[in-house]
Image: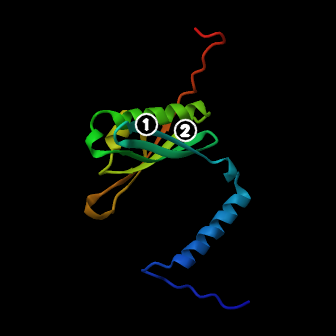
Amino acid sequence: MSPITVTTHLDDEADAAAAVDRGLGDHNVAVAPLHDVRPLSCFARSEREGVVGGAVGRRWGACVELQQLWVAERFRRQGLGRQLVLAFEAAAAGCGCRHAYLDTFSFQSPAMYQRLGYELAHEQAGFPGGIVRYHFVKRLPAARTEPAGGA
């Protein structure tokens, strides 16, 4: 066996990083049912402007992760972000998800998530400019089902 060397890089090492990504991916697929991870997204569209907002994430078993929430500048502060999160949660609950989680920074929308019932699970300070990263969790209600024959 040849000797192992460890090197440190402060610049981009794309080939080495890709090898790590492939290796970790192969390991994860071998030990976890990652083939069950499914995308989930909700979009807000304007007839004139196309997509003006969206909630993008993924679901896996009873868990759903909101990875990205964005609303175009001119549509902010009108409740559209809230609508997107609620639609995302409803779709997730309809797929059997009971646990939602997300990460957000202090310059994004942590207060909105708290108003929507998300609980702070972890707070990480130390970023430039006093920025803080938050990890939020929320228990989703069971999906509503309509009684047979409607009502």
Find residue 26 and report its horizontal and vertical position in percent: 69, 65
Residue at point 57% right, 22% down?
144
Q: Quadrant of the C terminus?
A: top right
Residue with the most extreme bottom position: 2
The amino acid beneath tag 2 is His
The amino acid beneath tag 1 is Val
Q: CA distance from mark 1 to mark 2?
A: 14 Å
54 vs 96: above or below: below
Q: Quadrant of the N terminus?
A: bottom right
Residue at point 55% right, 74% down?
17
Find residue 102 and report its horizontal and vertical position in percent: 46, 46
Looking at the picture, tell me which residue is in the foreground, 145 or 74. Answer: 74
Looking at the picture, tell me which residue is in the foreground, 48 or 147. Answer: 48
Considering the numbered disc 2 on the image, is that residue within a helix, a strand or a loop?
strand
Quarter occupied by residue 117: top left
Left or right of 74? Residue 71 is: right
Q: Which mark is residue 85?
A: 1
> How would you rate the neighbour count of disc 1 (Cα within 10 Å): few for under 14, some for 14-19, many for 20 or more?
many
Residue at point 67% right, 52% down?
34
The residue at which mark 2 appears reads as 99
70 vs 90: above or below: below
Looking at the picture, tell me which residue is in the foreground, 123 or 62. Answer: 62
Quarter occupied by residue 79: top left
Considering the numbered disc 1 on the image, is that residue within a helix, a strand or a loop?
helix
- Decide if residue 72 is in sight here: yes
Q: Which mark is nearer the camera, 1 or 2?
A: 1
